[in-house]
Amino acid sequence: METQSGLTLSEIVRGRRTIQEFNGEPIDSELLLELLGDAVWAPFHSKKEPWRFILFTGEGRRVFAEAVIACRPPAFAEKYGAQMREAYCRQIPVHLVVVMKNMLPPKAWEEALAATAALIQNIQLLAWEKGIGCVWKTSPFNDDETFRAAVGVESGEKAAATLHLGCFDPADRPEAKPRTPVRELLTWIDGASGGGSGRA
């Protein structure tokens, strides 16, 4: 596994890509624990972190695969089930369901979701630093009661995201999508220059 630990944070942020083609190489369990242990230092607003994790590796990936397939119409599952099992149980080494507290007052829920999104971005960047790709899925199955019950999402919780993580071949690294120049997105208010405002 090739790491990119010599990169600056700016280079990691700019270089990270969503990876959807994994090569099946396993990821060491201690490395996964290290990634999550660092990622939980994301900011949060409540007295206690609003998130927890459900992790599927090894043979445990079959539980995840069957939970996803069970959400599909029978005809779809019959046609594509074998292909999905191959991808989820062999090609992708890690499935991570990020769970957050859901039964909260509206403002607290909004803050919990924002904090959980920051945590997820931490996971993606920390993984990229180690040469591990990630795709962040907010697929409909995250809210499906069959899926939730099968993977262990409890009442009063939301499956905020499913992350697929794995190693990948450099040739499968996608090109960057263009970003709007920040000057076109920025309204800069500078009271020191007479209170004027406008596009930078």
Image: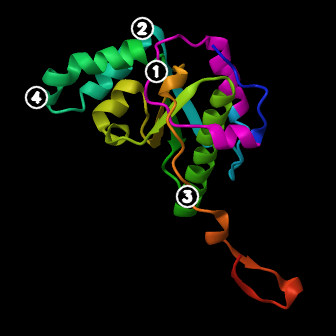
Disc 1 secondary structure class: loop
Report whether 175 appears left or right of 71.
Answer: right
Between 175 and 186, which is closer to the camera in this rendering? 175
* Sequence-earlier tag: 3 or 1: 1
Pointer 4 residue: 75
Q: Residues within 10 Å of mark 4 (few under 14, many from 20)?
A: few
Q: Is residue 68 visible?
A: yes
Residues marked 4 and 3 touching at CB (< 8 Å) = no
The kind of residue on which mark 4 rests is Ala
Q: Position of residue 102 (x, y in %)?
A: 49, 48
Query: How far apart are the alpha carbons under marks 1 and 2?
Result: 17 Å
Q: Is residue 192 above or below residue 13?
A: below
Distance in Å between CA atoms under marks 3 and 2: 35 Å
**Which residue is depicted at the point 63% across and 20% down?**
32
Residue at numbered disc 3: 110
Cα distance, mark 4 to mark 2?
26 Å
Q: Which is nearer the N-term, disc 4 or disc 3?
A: 4
How packed mark 1 is, by other alpha carbons closer than 10 Å (few <14, some 14-19, many 20 or more), is many
Residue indicated by mark 2: 59
Label 2 crowd (10 A; few <14 / some 14-19 / many >=20): few
Name the residue nearer the viewer: 71 or 27. 27
Marks 3 and 1, how far apart at CA: 33 Å
Gap between marks 4 and 3 measured at Cα: 38 Å
Q: Is residue 40 left or right of residue 159?
A: right
Q: What is the x, y in percent for residue 23? A: 47, 15
The quadrant of the rendering that contains the N terminus is: top right
Label drawn at residue 80: none
Pair 4/2: label in front: 4
On-image quarter of the C terminus:
bottom right
For disc 3, the neighbor class at 10 Å (few under 14, some 14 to 19, many from 20) is: few
Residue type pointed to by label 3? Glu
Q: Which mark is residue 22?
A: 1
